[in-house]
Amino acid sequence: MTGNTAPALADALAGGTLVLDGGMSNQLESAGHDLSDALWSARLLAERPEAITEAHLAYFEAGADVAITASYQATFEGFARRGIDRERAAGLLALSVDLAREAADRARAKGAGRPLWVAASAGPYGAMLADGSEYRGRYGRTVAELEAFHRPRLEVLAAAGPDVLALETVPDTDEAEALLRAVRGLGVPAWLSYTVSGDRTRAGQPLREAFALAVDADEVIAVGVNCCAPGDVDAAVETAARVTGKPVVVYPNSGETWDARARAWDGRTTFATTRVTGWRDAGARLIGGCCRVGPRQIASIAETLRPTPA
């Protein structure tokens, strides 16, 4: 792998809007991989890492500028339940960054002439529980306990050399506070992204209070929302931009709803790329999709956001 030659992500955000990738799990499932166990896509880090590289590549080829690693559900605790020791788990976390970087190298070799970045995903505590609690929050853990859970994983991911840490699908302000503490001193910028319902976090806190936590966090280069209904994004972008003055990151789901008991998606798709110009105009500088949003939709976002060459 040749490594990253892109400018710093924060500098790129100051100059325009970047396209994020879409859902990792749906892309892997569409390629025929079974993600039905508790490790979800993280299982393939150990069993089929080449499949993850191919999924990243599909999004880069669709027009994504930023790939989010397959480490959302990768934790020391989750791997331990599968008999994977701490040293091996750390290696798999680092591998998630290497695989995304490899996909970027392959995309450039195939003619992608634009800068490409890698965001190392750090999902919430509830993702490790694999019971849908990331959509509720309020785990019964203190901020200090949550910080102790997140810090070792973030240290490993940061050491692997991503361009940014994606603190994503955060359901409440306690976990946000813990994550903001955990990224201090790591030397890698981060974005903080809540999962929301209406104008509140999943745990019910007003978004203006949730976003305010990041105002004085120098490590945080963008704030926003992900893994939510597309209709919840509009107001969230405006609130995040107004409260923090920082670039906004948005990547909603397709609009379908996850049934944790049935481990299946329900409802209909409401994701429409016609929305993205409004998000950009309101302050969004990183725009993509989360669960059930695939390369076709990302290609449409890229086409919408990038000016047509003269």
Image: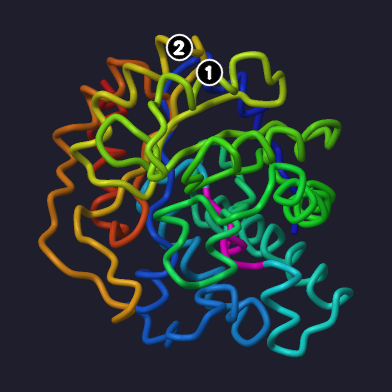
- In the image, residue 101 sits, relative to residue 300, either above or below, namely below
Provide the residue span drawn in magenta.
Answer: 67-74
Which residue is labeled 2 in the image?
A: 243
**Label 1 close to label 2 by CB (< 8 Å):** yes
Please identify the quadrant where the C terminus is shown: top left
- Magenta region, main secondary structure: loop
Residue at 80% of width from left, 31% of height from top?
184
Dot placed on the residue nearer the N-terminal end, 1 or 2: 1
Q: Residue at x 68, y 20 (%)?
A: 217
Secondary-structure class at tag 1 = helix
Tell me how far mark 1 sits from mark 2, CA to CA. 6 Å
The outermost residue toward the front is 140
Q: Secondary structure at mark 2?
A: helix
Left or right, residue 3 beside residue 294: right
Count of numbered marks: 2
Where residue 9 sits, quadrant-wise, is top right
